[in-house]
Image (tube, helix red, strand yellow):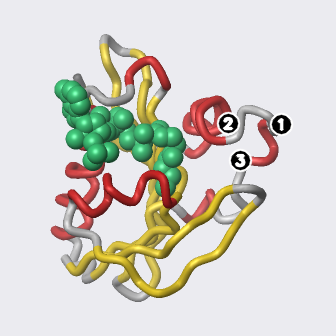
Amino acid sequence: MEIRQITASETWEIRQQVMWPDQPLSYVILPDDDHGMHFGLFLNARLISVASIFITENQAQLRKFATKREYQQKGYGTALLQYIIDQITKKGTEKIWCNARKMKSNFYENFGFTYTDKEFQKGKIPYVIMEKRL
Ligand SMILES: CC(C)(COP(=O)(O)OP(=O)(O)OC[C@H]1O[C@@H](n2cnc3c(N)ncnc32)[C@H](O)[C@@H]1OP(=O)(O)O)[C@@H](O)C(=O)NCCC(=O)NCCS
């Protein structure tokens, strides 16, 4: 297993397949992608989990975190998110936050993220903003 920084375009296929399979690839390309840091977890040299980080004023937004379906629930997402948190903590980032799909909020809670009262819906998917002080 290897975790390292990757380019935005390397994340797009997994983002689309896992998060928005009914949408075209263009749907998961963020206008801000050029300004983000992108991380990937490789298993036997194949990319299986991705996540992106956008830092503004010492606060990091985690976006488009996805593990290929057949590799979910095996600890890879945890390893990737822990690596990212370690990296941004070293850089002096004070807070990480994300728009969490409510069905995944347990996962973030287990990382020590707490719920805010900010909630919204995108398509049919309900979200809550969650955050963690670093
Ligand atoms: C969210 C996501 C990226 C997590 O990636 P993952 O690789 O499945 O993460 P992990 O395997 O480390 O953890 C997932 C769960 O499996 C559990 N787990 C970890 N290792 C495990 C193992 N060896 N055996 C069984 N379960 C395990 C974790 O405790 C965790 O449980 P929790 O959700 O109740 O906290 C993944 O579920 C995903 O891609 N979801 C679809 C896209 C999405 O919703 N992204 C997040 C948007 S907010």
Element assignment for label 1: loop
Queried on whether the Cβ of the residue with tag 2 lies below 8 angstroms from ligand 1, the answer reads: no
* Label whose residue precedes the other's in the sequence (3 or 2): 2
Q: Residue at x 31, y 52 (%)?
A: 107
Q: What is the three-letter code of the residue carrying label 1?
A: Pro
The residue that mark 3 highlights is: 28
- Which x, y percent locates residue 7? 52, 42
Circle 3 Cα neighbour tier, 10 Å, few/some/many (<14 / 14–19 / ≥20): some
Q: Earlier in the sequence, mark 1 or mark 2?
A: 2
Quote the CA–CA distance across marks 3 and 2: 6 Å
Q: Residue at x 57, y 66 (%)?
A: 127
Direction from residue 33 to residue 72 in the image, left or right: left
- Read off the residue under disc 2: 16
Against 73, is 35 above or below?
below
Q: Quadrant of residue 6?
A: top left
Comparing 41 with 9, the one in front is 41
Q: Is residue 8 above or below residue 68?
A: below
Q: Quadrant of ligand 1?
A: top left
Measure the C-alpha gap from mark 3 to mark 1: 8 Å
Residue at 41% from the left image edge and 88% from the top image edge: 57
Count of numbered marks? 3
Q: Position of residue 130 (x, y in %)?
A: 40, 74
Instruction: Name the amino acid, label 2.
Output: Gln
The residue that mark 1 highlights is 24
Tell me which amino acid carries mark 3.
Val
Contact? badges 3 and 2 (CB < 8 Å):
yes
C-alpha span from label 1 to label 2: 7 Å
